[in-house]
Image (tube, helix red, strand yellow):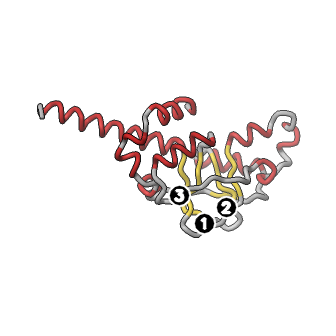
Amino acid sequence: MESIAFALLQEHDVSTSREGATMKISSIISGKRVETISASASIHDLVNTLNSHHIGALVVSSDGKRIDGIVSERDVVRAMPGKLDQLIGMHVRDIMTVEVHTCTPDTTVAELMKMMTEHRIRHVPVVDGEGVLISIVSIGDVVKNRVGEMESENQALRDYVATGA
């Protein structure tokens, strides 16, 4: 899925898409919640939370506003080799990513696609102007949005050709 998602993002030159170049992240996050977890939570709690919400990442935050890190299912898998017997006693702080790339609601979809592609990340927390956590965007959200844009462009071209203009 990830390679398909990145291929879709890279295949289309976003600079030629009027929608992709100007559409803001705010249109993707409308009504979308962000789930958080404490750095002191157990790996067991982390896995159960990811599973119960059917999501791939949680923002690590002590207060639900400030970002302390991010942790994903990929972080759990990467912690397993050589530490499987220790995993049960580990905490989120032991495996989370501390350097978190973020965006704002005013970030364009094109800018976010570039960031996700360059840094090979699949989840980007969305913060307001003061750095307060307000949402999260996944690669799936971006791909869904991009496919929708491409379908709209395709239909517009079909309509144009059908009218003979």
Amino acid found under the numbered disc labelled 1 = Gly
- Residue 47 vs residue 29, the one in the foreground: 29
Q: Residue at point 69% right, 62% down?
A: 61
Q: Is residue 13 left or right of residue 157?
A: right
- Residue tagged 3: 33
- Residue tagged 1: 131
User: Spatial distance from mark 3 to mark 1, Cα to Cα?
Assistant: 16 Å
User: Spatial distance from mark 1 to mark 2, Cα to Cα?
Assistant: 8 Å
Quadrant assignment for the C terminus: top left
Q: In front of the other: label 1 or label 2?
A: 1
| Residue 71, above or below 120 | below
Cβ–Cβ under 8 Å for marks 3 and 1: no
Numbered tag placed on residue 67 in the rendering: 2
Quadrant assignment for the N terminus: top right
Q: Is residue 51 left or right of residue 18?
A: right
| Residue 64, above or below 96 | below
User: Spatial distance from mark 2 to mark 3, Cα to Cα?
Assistant: 15 Å
* Residue with the most extreme left position: 164
Give the SS element for disc 1.
loop
Tell which circle, 2 or 3, labels the residue nearer the N-terminal end.
3
